[in-house]
Image (tube, grey):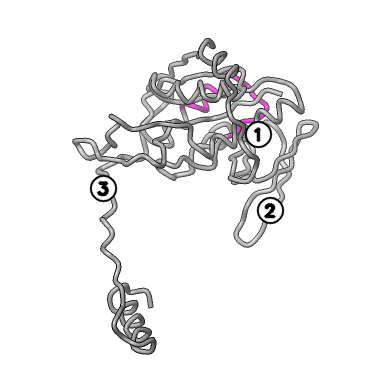
Amino acid sequence: MNIVVLVKQVPDTATRIKIASGGTEIERQGVNFVVNPYDEFAIEEALRLREQHQGQVTVLTVGDEKSEEALRTALAMGADEAVRVSAAATDSMTTARAIASVVHGLAPDLVIAGKQAVDDDEGQVGSLVAALLDWPQVTVVTKLELKDGTGVAEREVEGGVEIVDFSLPAVITAQKGLNEPRYASLPGIMKAKRKEIRQVSVDAKTVGEPTLRTLSLQLPPERSAGKILSGMDASSAAKELVRLLHEEAKLI
């Protein structure tokens, strides 16, 4: 079984983000970048499926040379091959077009991605790739079983779990709870440093025009200091709290 895992390099969630001059991008200088956490679940699931069914795991990303760091992390975890796609992709749709064109040539049995990237939280690329390839898709998957060219997946829905039967090839997006990602071993890290990362360029005609343009980025407003109600009895404090929640916080 051949599996392609889509990965993205994102800022560490503990990193303090600053807006770059121009106001449409984040300041990359001094920012620690990591593999998108949801993509780690995708990598781990692909490795487990390879252990069960044999085959190969290929990790793929769209980005510049720095994004190869994410690919090497995936290689250190145990992926077999890595592909970096160079394309003028600026939004989810153009990224998906670039990915779909390369995945089509790789002809995998399964594509796995994280359910969303934690930098933009759009959660669109996996579904768009499936639509462009005209493959079945199952999103926010928390359990996955494959057998004889078909699969059964459990996915989160509001108030419960939905069980979906599907045929291969297909696209799956991984949700937290699907598995527990492994740590890269020292031998794996050393091997990953020596592995070649294949580079593929996708032309502008294939990528097409973006459907989304970023006008500006803004940091959220600073939180105001909290209020402490003191110097009054419980009954008066409760009345004052209700008033503040109604008139100032606008919560009730």
Considering only order in the chain, which callout, 3 or 1, is on the residue closer to the N terminus?
1
Q: Quarter-wise, where is residue 18 in the image?
A: top left
Residue at label 3?
A: 218
> What type is the residue that disc 2 sits on?
Glu
Q: Is residue 110 magenta?
A: yes
The magenta region covers 98-112
Residue at horizontal 60 percent and vertical 16 percent from the top: 187
In this rendering, would 145 be left or right of 230?
right
For marks 1 and 3, give the CA distance. 36 Å
Residue 222 in the image, given as x and y percentages of width and height: 26, 56
For marks 3 and 2, give the CA distance. 37 Å
Residue 235 in the image, given as x and y percentages of width and height: 38, 89
Considering only order in the chain, which callout, 2 or 3, is on the residue closer to the N terminus?
2
Name the quarter where the C terminus is drawn. Answer: bottom left
SS under mark 2: strand
How would you rate the neighbour count of disc 2 (Cα within 10 Å): few for under 14, some for 14-19, many for 20 or more?
Answer: few
Furthest residue toward front: 231
Residue at horizontal 32 percent and vertical 41 percent from the top: 16
Residue at label 2?
A: 162
Residue at label 1?
A: 45
> What type is the residue that disc 1 sits on?
Glu
> What type is the residue that disc 3 sits on?
Gln
Q: Tag on residue 177?
A: none
SS under mark 3: loop
Residue at horizontal 63 percent and vertical 43 percent from the top: 138
Is disc 2 in contact with disc 1, using a CB cutoff of under 8 Å? Answer: no
Discs 3/2, front: 3
Is disc 3 in contact with disc 2, using a CB cutoff of under 8 Å? Answer: no
Vertical order, 228 against 33 (above or below)? below
How would you rate the neighbour count of disc 3 (Cα within 10 Å): few for under 14, some for 14-19, many for 20 or more?
Answer: few
